[in-house]
Every structure is written in C-alpha cells, then in structure tokens.
Image: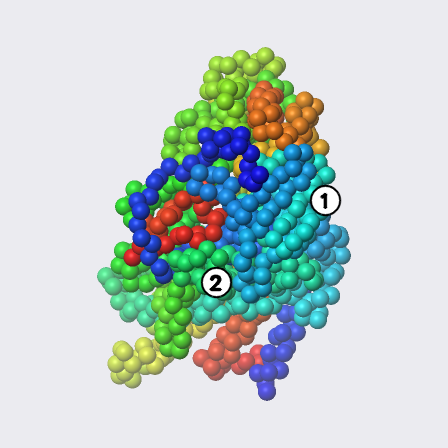
Amino acid sequence: MTGPTRREMLLLGATAMIPTAAFAQETPQRGGVLTVHFATEQRILNPSLQASTGVYIVGGKIQEALVDLDAQGQPIGVLAESWESAPDGKTHTFHLRRGVTWHDGKPFTSTDVAFTAMEMWKKILNYGTTLQQFLTEVQTPDPHTAVFKYEKPMPQGLLLRALPDLGYVSPKHVYESGDIRQNPANTAPVGTGPFKFVTYERGQHVIADRNPNYWRNGMPYLDRVVWRVIGDRAAAAAQMEAGQILFSPYSSLTIADMQRLGRDPRFEATTRGNEGNVRTNTLEFNFRNPILADIRVRKALAHALNVPFFIENFLGPFAKPGTGPIPSVSTDYYPTEPMPQYGYDVAQANRLLDEAGHRRGAGGVRFNLRLNPAPWGEDIALWSTFIQQSLQQVGVRVEIVRLDAAGFLRTVYNDWNFDLATGWHQYRSDPAVSTTVWYRSGSPRGAPWTNQWGWKDDRIDGIIDAAATEVDPVKRKALYADFVRAAQTELPLWMPIEQIFVSVFNKRIRNAGNNPRWASSSWHDTWLAS
Amino acid sequence: MKVLTLALRRLAASLPTLLLIIAGMFLLLQLAPGDTVDALMAQMGGGDPALAADLRRFYGLDVGVAAQLGRYMMRLITLDLGFSAIYGKPVATVILERLPPTILLMASAQSFAFFFGLVLGVLAARRVNRWPDTLISTLGLIFYATPSFWFGLMAIVVFSVYLQWFPPGGFSDITQSLTGLAAVLDIAKHLVLPTLTLGLIFLAIYLRIMRASMLEVLSLDFVRTARAKGLSETRVVARHVLRNAMLPMVTLIGLQAGTMLGGSVVVESVFALPGLGRLAYESVVQRDLNTLLGIVFVSAILVIVINFLVDILYARLDPRITAGS
C-alpha cells in the first residue's frame, strides 16, 4: 500500500485547499529571467536548516523536499516517489526517486535523507526539532529506501503535511565533515532542484541558473532566477512598476500599493498560491496581571473590538474574521460545528467589566494596560492602534509600546513584561506543527510563539497530547474540534482575524500560484510570456 | 614628510576617542532588549529554547557583558574585527564588500553638492536681493526642508517609472554581465538618482554658506582696492573673492562627511544600494554587535581621514594657515 489510506484520500480530496483560478492551456515558452523581490535577507539559504518563508523563496528552488503539495493541496512525491506507514504509526517507509543527482554531480541516495533527518531536521531545523523529537533512527536498507523509526506514533497525515516545509534534503557529502552551522554551503546551497545556485551578493541579489540535468525532463523553462534585495516597501512597488521585479511574495508591499497594483491591468495581486501560508492576528493576554486572569475581562476586551469594521476599512479584501486557532483554509482540521465567538457588543463589554468589579474611575477610566505590538506587518501596527482606540470607549486606557523584532521577542516571550501583545500566528499545515504550542503549558521560558501567558489548563494539555499522536485521521479531527472549543471558551489568547499572504505578480509569469505554497515551491513549471 | 608626521600625530590623538566610541557603542547596544539570537528567531519564525541556547553558545553570547567586551577589545588590538553573525564571514570582509558603493555615493554626492552649491551661491550673491537670488534661495530652502526619502521615491516615480530614464534601484544591472566601459557607465547610470537625492540637501547648505560668505568677503577692504585698480567685476570675483569665500565651504566638507554617512542609510534603503549605511541599519535590527562595531570603527577612521585632508586643503587655500599649526 503506497500513499495515503483510502479514507485519508477521500478526506483530502473532498476538503483540500484548492487554488481557485484555472489556467488556459498555453504552450510554455523557454528562456527568460524571473526577477523576484527579496524583502528580508536571511543568514542562510538552506531550507533543511531554517524553516522560514524567507529561506524557501530562494532555497526552495535549489533544494527539494521529499514531498510537496500539488494543485489540490495533496501531498505529492518529489524526492520520494511513494511511501507507506505501519499501522502503529511508528514506522514510515519512503521509496526514493532514482536517477536524481546533486548539482555537483554526485548521486542522491537514502544516506542523504538519513543524514539530513538525524543531523539537521532533528537537531537544528526550527519546528523540525519538535516534529522529529521522537525520531530514533532512519534505516537505509538500500540506496533508494529510507525507513523512519519513531519512538511514539507519528500520524502519517501530520508527517506528510509537515514535510513540504520541514522535509528539504541536503547532500551528506557536502555536510558530513565540520560544523554544520558554519558550512559554506549554507549560503551557497547545493541541491537537486530545477535551479543551480550561482552567486549571492549580500545586500544586492541572489542568482540561480537553470539546472540542465534536472530529473523532470525538459524542465525548468526559465533560464535564470534573480532575487533582488529591496528592503524599502515603497521602492519595491516602484521597481515592480518599472519592470525590474516581476514577483513580490508574502505581502511584502504596503497594503495601499498591493491594492493599487491589483487594479493595474499589468499586475495581479492575489492570495492564490498562498493557501498554505495563512496567518491569524492575535491578542495575547498576560495572566500574571490579575485583571487579565479574569475570564470576564478577556471576553469584555474581545467584545469591545469591532473586527469586521477594522477589516473592511483597513485590511481590505485579503482578510476575514477569524473563528479560532485553526484557520478556515485548513479544511482537514477546521471544525465543522460552530464554536464560541465574541462579536462586537460594547454594552456586553461594559457589563462584563462592571461585573468583574472594575468600575469607571476618574475620567471614565477603569484600568490601564500596556500593549506590545510585533513589528512585522503594517496590519499589526494598524490593529494595535485600533485596539487602543476601541478599548478607550469601554474605559480601558492602553499604552502602546513599540519595539523591533529582537526587542519584542525578548520582552514578551522571555521577560513577560507586557499586559497585552499582538502579532501573527502562522499556521503551518497542521495544528501540531504550529498552533498547539500557543496553548500547551510547559513551554520553557523564552520560546517565542508559545504559551508564555502564565496560563495552564490540564484538559487542553490532555487534548493536545492525544491529538499529536492519534493515528486515526477522523479521531484526530474530532480531538482538534474539542481543542478549538476549549480554547475559544477559556480564551487564553484570541485570534480574531484570518489573513492569507498576498502575492503580486506581473502577468507575464505563467503557471503562477498553481499550488498552495507556490512562492516556496520549486517553480519547475514556471515560464514567462514574452 | 611633514605631512606624514602630522598624519601619525593625528591618528595617535584620535585613538582614545576611537576606543571610547567603541566601548560606548557596545554598552549602548546592551540596553536594547534582545540579542542576535532573538533576532534570528524572529526571522526563522520560531524555534525551541534548547536551539536558542545552542545558538547563543555558537555566537559567543553565553558569557557576561564584561567578558564579551573584553574579548572584543583583545581582538581589536590585533586588528581582528571578529565574525559577523548575520553574514557568516569575517566583519572586515563584509565591510570591504560594502565600502565601495558608499564611498562612490558619498564622493559623487559631495562633489555634486559642492560644485552646484558654489555656482548657485556665487550667482545668488552677485544678484543679491534681486529675482535670481530670491529664486535660488527659495529653491535652496525647499531642498533643505524636504526629507530625502521622499525626494528619492518621487525621483523613482518620475524618472524610472514614467520617463524610464534611469533604473529605479540597485548598484548595477544583474540581468546582463557587462565589462569594461559598459560596466562603468552602467554603475554611473544607477548612481544618478541616489546622488541627486543625497546631494540636494547638502547642496542647499553649501549654497546658503557660499552666498553668505561671498557677501561678507565682497564688503571687505581688499575688494574695494581691487575694484579701485579698475579690475572688471568678473575678475574681482574669480581672482580675489572666490578663494577667500571658499574657506567656510571647505570646513563644511569635513563636518558633513559624518552627516553624509548617516544620510546614506535612507538613500541606500530607498535605492536598494548595498552600502555601509544599510549594513549598519541591518546590524542594529539584527543585534549583530561585531558588524556594527566594525562599521563604527571604519566610519570613524573615514571621518578622521577626510578631516585630515580638509586641513591640508585649508593650508593650500590660505597660506596664512600652515598645516602644522
């Protein structure tokens, strides 16, 4: 039996994240240079060592993963051709593609997979260290078979959903000697992908050329990909208009520019191709402040915020109200029954605050709170100001403390020096990868984007642990519905807005956005119309 | 020989300042919450604390602040600027890579501002309180009051997006590999808009100074003497006034060198130039201490050198000032 079970197939088929636009069949043209906006330079470009969109945008074209997602959002083999899992979920066997070579000419084998899994995914890769913590060994019975052995059951659905992001393979012969973190290949990656690394000029550009020996015959179509480093958002929009860049990924332009370019017939601003990269805006509460430890206060603050108004007037068509920690694009785990929600109701908010014993004092003020907004994204800055002004109307005075990235993470997740915080929760294909850590107690102090609220709920901890090792997809989905209900009832943090990242394409790019993680994917079938 | 001794003396005198600046910067950066591992975590989008502890060891952040400063100073004595956390290579290499665009940009902006500031200043002074003076002074005021990022963006919109005369950013055209004269012309083309953007504010300053200085010198006795000799007005200005009026301008070059390094952060960001200013900004955001201190070190030396050159130039303009005094 290869591939997902029949039941999983049905589930996936019925519910997958489907990119909406259909493409007219055109004959692909060969050649051309695709220029891409590279907004935040990374320290390394190897996606087996760092899981972030800033790395995938470059490294994902040079290195390949075991599996990726196809147009319907289903796992499809890349370096693995097929796979099977033991019923207990402790053994997963991957049959690897034959005849694949690294860019330096050496053959790709199962020892590369075993080395990458044990030395990189399990030890260095962020999110990978958590995902693979119960991986005990990777057996290589022959050069084209890799057998993953787990100490505790690993649901196949979770593994296959996680591997497109956390399953990039690196060449063992390049990395086996010396410190992996200092290997020169970290910024000059060697892979099996459709594009071969050429040069990386810091602060300027990365260049990769067509790999003539690529295993997908006749591909890729493009001659070259150039990533231009442009930090300034407004300048990037101008470069887009001047034709210097053809593609700007992951909402890297200002909201106004994205809407303006979207109306220009030369460009397309769309969430298509980013269905796998959804984020929710958060409102995080510090339970060490006794005012916020009261559930009535947390609910009151939620009721005081008019989310639909904010979305309509500030974020535009690329956002919608969120309903809980699992976003609606995750059709595998998005609960089907309605969950507790906190609609806009100022009277209710005032009533709850009165009940909690916080009467209005001098100047109509009930109490003061400090709000730390994360520095990434214009939407967070707008949302924090909106929170400040909305809460003023129910008698809560909010002081906004703005910090840069390092300062924000340290202050909120390590020093716990905040009352309210707001940022993004990025959903990564499966709640066990990215979401439950925001709710599970016991995260060591200082771990960013985890439960650092000073809040613990044994029931929720139990559900999270059970779901992480539940092999049956139907039972897993039911457990995650219980999780969402409990999270929305206790409200340790609130995720009221759901947004998919926006790509801005020059319309010359064809096959753009044809899978749910297109900006991160390999672009082997991308071509440019003249 | 005399110049060399002077240079060495200058350098020795500035060493304590240099050390103070570096120690001060080091301590100042400790006040900013978070370290380079926090910044890396932000970039990665998460990671567990064991990984963070491992990275802190890797970057040498697992010891106290005093020990870190001590380590840095010891290395600096051997002229080793350390290893850059964000770039994964020696700081000296990183800075050397970024220095040419910044120096090129500063030199061209400085020359542009100096030359046109001088010409416009002289023109305004000769037609003082008449319409050319009013026009030039108003323009100067506008240039001075407009923020350079706005100028930069407007220049991109007009000259790159609409007229398509100049490229909107970058240091060279990377879609084709040029060599020789073509490559030089290509870089020059890329530098036109950044030079104008960075130069305009300084042009305004030079213009005002030149105008005031001209007016002052024109009222001095030796000018009256020159006129009494029967010299033509052009000759009076070119031979007698200009040289004396230029002294404050030259002083300004030295003073503006530092400011220009600061201003280049904005211009380099807007035009996506791989220069020192943007490197400094990135190092602060990423809390990359070694790189930042390296930049401070190199910039300080750059400013010291420019001021030294200005002093020598001074002596040439006005023989009463000797380089030694």
- Mark 2 or mark 1: name the one nearer the start of the chain: 1
Q: Position of residue A278 (x, y in %)?
A: 49, 37
Q: Residue drawn at (67%, 70%), measured in percent from left and top?
A: B79
Q: Is residue B259 left or right of residue A154?
A: left
Eye-nearest disc, 2 or 1: 2
- The numbered mark at residue B230 is none
Q: CA distance from mark 2 to mark 1?
A: 34 Å
**Dot 1: what SS?**
strand
- Quadrant into which the N terminus of chain A falls: top right
- What amino acid does circle 2 point to? Asn
Task: Name the chain letter of the residue that bears numbered label 1.
Answer: A
Label 1 CA crowd tier, 10 Å (few <14, some 14–19, many 20+): some
**Residue found 44% across the figure and 67% down from its top:** B105
- SS at circle 2: loop
Residue furthest out toward the left: B131
| Labelled disc at residue A213 | 2
Q: Is residue B218 above or below residue A217?
A: below
User: Dividing the image into 4 quarters, which one contains the C terminus of chain A?
Assistant: bottom left
Any part of residue A451 in sight: no
| Residue placed most toward the observer, B25 or B248 | B25
Instruction: Pick whichever, B142 or B94, lies toward us.
Output: B94
Residue A301 higher or lower than A270, as above or below: above
x and y percentages locating residue A141 in the rendered image:
68, 51
Three-letter amino acid code at the position of disc 1:
Thr
Q: Quadrant of residue A458?
A: top right
Which residue corresponds to mark 1? A136
> How dense is the environment of label 2, judged by Cα within 10 Å: few (below 14), some, or many (20 and up)?
some
